[in-house]
Amino acid sequence: MRFVVIGGGPAGNQAATHAAQLGVEVTLIERDIVGGAANLGDCIPSKAMIATGGAMSYLRRIAGMGVLAAAGTVDLELLRTRITAITADLERANERILRSQEVEVVRGTARLDGPNTVVAETEAGERTFEADAILLSTGSRPRVPEWARVDDDRVMITRDAYPPAELPEHLVVIGSGVTGVEFVHMFASLGCEVTLIVSRQQVLPQKDPEVAAVLEADFARRGVHLLKGARAIGVERTPEGVIVRCDDGRSVRGSHTLLCIGSIPNSEGLALESAGIDLDPGGYVGINHHCQTVVPHIYAAGDLSGKLPLSSVATMQGRKIAEHVVGGHSVAHRHLNYDNAPSAIFTEPEIADVGLAEADAFAEGRKIRVTKVPFAASSRALIDNDPRGFVKIISDPATGVVLGGSIVGQHASELISVLGVAVTSGLRVADIVESMPVHPTLSEALSEAAE
């Protein structure tokens, strides 16, 4: 069996590696970064910069722990070198794993030529591959609206900011979703003045209001300006910087602006019509619960599939696709449940959630039990001089089964895995209580919230 994977991001890498382990002959075609441009060119660099910002915040916080230290300064060139080294190391690691599984890696741009043929344009010329199964996993790129002209200098997309040529004196961030608030945290931690344009009345409009409130309070403490109820409609370059104009007549002057207003799928140029595949109005490729398109042996995954734009979700899609290609779904096979996928936001404090949200449960008229414990009651949080945030667990009042939860606080992205396992496996709150977490740790708050 010949399996051709177009796109080497988290979905493509996992599908290729796992399929090869299952005995399939695999070819992976990638035009840019083995590991994915959205992942290694955006996600990982942003988290590396957030780590640097977090170190700066920690230096400012340790005075309360009895340590007298000078505030740190950021060397942008050293930071740029560090980020480049991290992404290069990860790309090499991805390539080593693929080679170890005898996956053929082809550098080039691929397109379909009918339902079973893939054509790759490479530096050495055109190559054609006949395939029994095909995966489309070409990812996405930052969205740029018509009213903004990106110049990689003063008007930036996210991939221009790792780091920028100079630290902004005053950065105006457009977009208050996950990406936007991460960049606000990042640059505020590095000492920049930051304004966030919020189109709704709270940041993270799709998240729990209590969660958003903690983040907004931290932004206020650090001097971040929130312009609420305003939607950006134009960006003007000036000799001093930029002016961002909003639909309500307000405007914001800054030295730089950063667009964080979503992404668009890389679906153009694939010649999907030659295989009988149509795109939805957003440019995504529709899939079923097996990640199959309307052509059963052609799959789509990752950002291109229009599902949750998370690397963890793309990786699991890739694994499920590999198993489906070899017929593994004919035995016990758990379908991927997107509603149970944990997610995290790497702000300070971190935010993470999984499963059923409290607001959604109330909207559905569903009976739930909500328990909440603040980290201010955690001995470890007090030891670390960072008691911000809380743990919230949502469970079924009749059975005690964990339905979801939210965590705001340090290491929330790690702690949410406990609730993720509980939600996915149908565990009860009593199971969390009886797990006997180590003392003193932040994980004790999970047991206390489950009481």
Image (cartoon, rainbow, N blue to C red):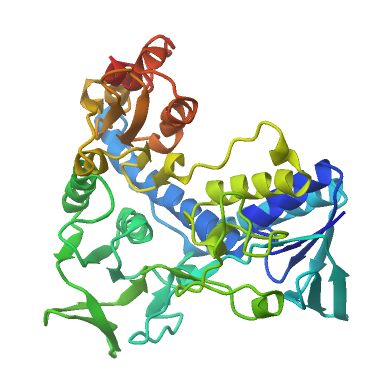
Total marks shown come to 0
Quick check: can you spot residue 421? yes
Side of 249 where 345 appears, left or right: right
Q: Residue 429, image x and y in percent?
A: 35, 18
Q: Residue 54, image x and y in percent?
A: 38, 46
Quick check: can you spot residue 70? no
Q: Residue 221, image x and y in percent?
A: 17, 49
Q: On screen, 447 above or below 411?
A: above
Q: In front: 185, or 427?
A: 427
Q: In front: 63, or 140?
A: 140
Instruction: Please name the residue shown 44% across and 39% down the image.
Output: 340
Looking at the rendered image, the quarter that the N terminus falls into is bottom right
Q: On screen, 264 above or below 85?
A: below
Instruction: Please name the residue shown 34% across and 22% down the image.
Output: 446
Side of 216 where 70 appears, left or right: right
Looking at the rendered image, the quarter that the C terminus falls into is top left
Instruction: Please name the residue shown 25% across and 38% down the image.
Output: 361
Instruction: Please name the residue shown 55% across and 42% down the image.
Output: 336
Q: On screen, 295 above or below 442?
A: below
- Which quarter of the figure has residue 275? bottom right
Q: Residue 310, image x and y in percent?
A: 50, 52
Side of 406 where 16 appears, left or right: right
Q: In front: 203, or 325?
A: 325
- Which quarter of the figure has residue 241? bottom left
